[in-house]
Amino acid sequence: MAEPTINLEQSFYEVKNYKSPILNWILSTDHKRIGLLYLYSIMTFFVVGALLGLAMKLELIAPGKTIMEAQTYNAAFTFHGIIMIFLIIIPGLPAVFGNFLLPIMIGAKDVAFPKLNLLSWWIYVLGAIVALLSQVMGDGPPDTGWTFYAPYSFKTTSTVLPALIGAFILGFSSILTGLNFIVTIHRMRAPGMTWLKMPLFPWTLYATAWIQLLATPVVGITLLMVIAEKMFQIGFFDPALGGDPILFQHLFWIYSHPAVYIMILPAMGVISEVIPTFCQKTIFGYKAIIASTLLIAFVGYFVWGHHMYTAGMSDTALWLFSLLTFLVAIPSAIKIFNWIATLYKGSINLEIPLYWALGFLFLFMIGGLTGLVLGSVATDVYVHDTSFVVAHFHFVMFGGTGTGFFAALHYWFPKMYGKSYDNTWAKVGFWGFIIGFMMLYMPMFTLGMQGMPRRYFDYLEQFHGGNILSSFGAIILIASLAIVIINLVTSAKRGKKAPKNPWDGITLEWQVDSPPTLENFETIPVVEKGPYDYKK
Amino acid sequence: MINRELIDASNLVAGVDKAFWVILTISFIFLIGLTITMLYFVYKYNKKRNPKATQIEGSIKLEIIWTTIPLALVLLMFYYGWQGYTPVTGDPPDDAMEVTAVARMWSFQFQYENGKKTDTLYLPKDKPVKINMKSLDVIHGLFIPAFRVKSDMVPGRDDMFRWFIPHLEGKFDLFCTEYCGLSHSYMYTSAVVMPEDKFNEWYKDTTKVVIPAGGKPGQAGLGVMKRIGCIACHSSDGSRLIGPSFKGLYNQPKVVIIGKEEKEITADDEYIKRSIFEPNAEIVKGFNKGLMLSYKDQLTDEEIELIIEYLKTL
């Protein structure tokens, strides 16, 4: 690679190592370009996943076949799950905003291993392509659900193998990103930035990175076992070969429950950045928020059993997992209290990112509180595998992480593109999102409490009312998301130039240019104050 | 919890609904309280009204308060959640009636101790019942919302059971709640609770197949097929489901695949029998292998004849 002279005062968009614009992106080791590569890949998949969700909801608008066959529906919810979980929400915030902002927020020029970082994106793309192959290969797209439960995943004639191999490959992308962030945070903080002077988004990325590093290998091994079983008939999980299907569930959830915290912790980090900035006030209980972040990451390893209350575990296991699940609720509650306390006596500048942060608080509270229903044995056994669980999961993952993602996007958009977006359309999009969201998922709680099982292509007449409401909510939600995304895309191209620090933030990213230069800082800053020290 | 009439539909209902009530009430209070506080702060401390923020680092006292109070509350929820489940933990009472629920893609069958087999779960009122959970293929779930009863049915794990006491007469929905493939949403039946004397009368009648008087020819065969779940995968009107339709099948030529070779056969009595007992030996062209399980030892010769009688009418 030829090393042309790089003007360090230019924005990173102007730095060109290759003649081809595409190569400048896909071969760049700049953390900011890699972050944006992830953003564009993830948003592309998100559009597909969201439209699949809409198609499913339209199918459920009335009992009986509406717009698709049962097999298509089953493939749709499987594909929706695989895309949303493995391609979007697990890499999600760390890959996009972690990559773009972590080095800047801790006062570094890049991550510790820039080439490894680019490799992670390439592995992500490879994994995504392999997973997508399952849609076009063999005897039809997989219909197992994103959980790949044994022995159905062995019985089905649909093409499961590429999806499994894809998920396996994606795991490496996750592990490498986690590794990179851990080393970056340990080794590359600016002089003076002690652990307790580090902003909270990097803190959550740090906790997340440890989960990525430690939990992902478990699912990797599990998927490998399934692949071996499918290809060589080695009986791990299929009772027909002498295996144990419950073992699969244990292994799957030992990863997939901590994975839920991979998904939500960075969103909590975003909220912890947005709220102080728009209150012009130091965050309430900085250390308590850090402690709760680490506690969630730790206790989160020991609660996987609450996915399996009806799977035939012993009574002792039931109450133990239930107790631990209730305990993991506490650190999340502590965060909520601290965020709300931060609003107290702030000087609140109600801008779009704060709308999304408050939206996060509201939707995440509903998600968290309904999680208590699922932690308790008696109530979980009743609503397990009903649409109640689907509603809870979407409140936490979409209402929580998704809303956090949009908060991050609106908060750091001026920094990433040097442009401002249209406030009116952003507000319309936000309110449509909240209304559509509530209309889509609230009825699913009541449907679940009425006893409607999940992953249902068709349903009995008594479940019709709630489903109609839910389907209309989906239409509103998708329309609002379109408004939000179109607003951002057009603003990135044609928006007004944004000032360097539009929100008066004081973390380090607001002290660099918008968009940042290749090496972010002219000289590496020396940190003397705490991250949210607004005392002037 | 939706229908108050069902408050005592089984010995689980009261405890489960109490746990719901405790958790949802506390949650609702927190949600409303915190949301209002949040919106009030956003209004009250808007920069127009409060141009300068007061810097507050935190408060150890508050952190302790809002750690211990929620901790106490979740422990309370944990307690009610576990209490609500204890009526059915451990072994069932000695006088419990045993029923074995057998699930397959995509039907339930209930086998009673006297050899009676049904597609609907019949239960005596106020008597403990132990349901053994058995699955022949993939994981299914048995869920009777009205009774708050749910258990997975795991193939290869024949020791699983759930016991409870139904207290309310009537007909209740019974769903499969573990996703099990194409017709998962059609895998449902009913649980019928009858007074004990009426149940005993029904129970004693072990005539395997009831031929309805004056019924159309073949109706008895249709009854057998409904009971063992054939119609979940095979239509009677020519439409394509998982397996080939029964319409226009009997004594007609069919192309089947044996191993890897195609062969034309006639769907005669012998073929139908083979297809029921060894469903994967000869696969009708265009359909998939491995989806149907053998019905060996589950049907008598007499019943097979009834099935064939029914197929003749299509």
Image (tube, coloured by chain):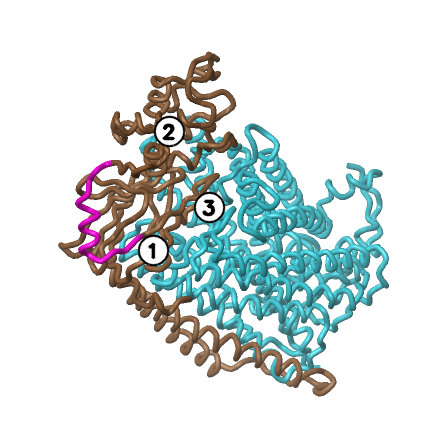
Chain colours: A cyan, B brown
Q: Quadrant of residue A187?
A: bottom right
User: What is the magenta range?
Assistant: B192-208
Residues at marks 2 and 3, CA–CA distance in whole angstroms: 27 Å
Residues at marks 3 and 1, CA–CA distance in whole angstroms: 19 Å
The label on residue B310 is 2
Depth check: give the residue in front, B262 or B116. Answer: B116
Look at the image and say whether residue A78 sits in the magenta stretch. Answer: no
Horizontal side of residue B313 vs B58, given as left or right: left
Name the amino acid type tagged 3. Ser
Please give the residue where the numbered disc 1 appears in the rendered image. B171
Q: Are marks 2 and 3 in contact (CB under 8 Å)?
A: no
Q: Are marks 3 and 1 in contact (CB under 8 Å)?
A: no
Horizontal side of residue B186 vs A280, given as left or right: left
* Chain of the residue under label 1: B
Look at the numbered disc 1 and give the secondary structure of its residue. Answer: strand
Q: Residue at x 39, y 30 (%)?
A: B292
Q: Residue furthest left?
A: B94
Give the mark toward the camera: 1 or 2.
Answer: 2
Please give the residue where the numbered disc 3 appears in the rendered image. B185
Horizontal side of residue A461 vs B305, given as left or right: right
Look at the image and say whether residue B197 sits in the magenta stretch. Answer: yes
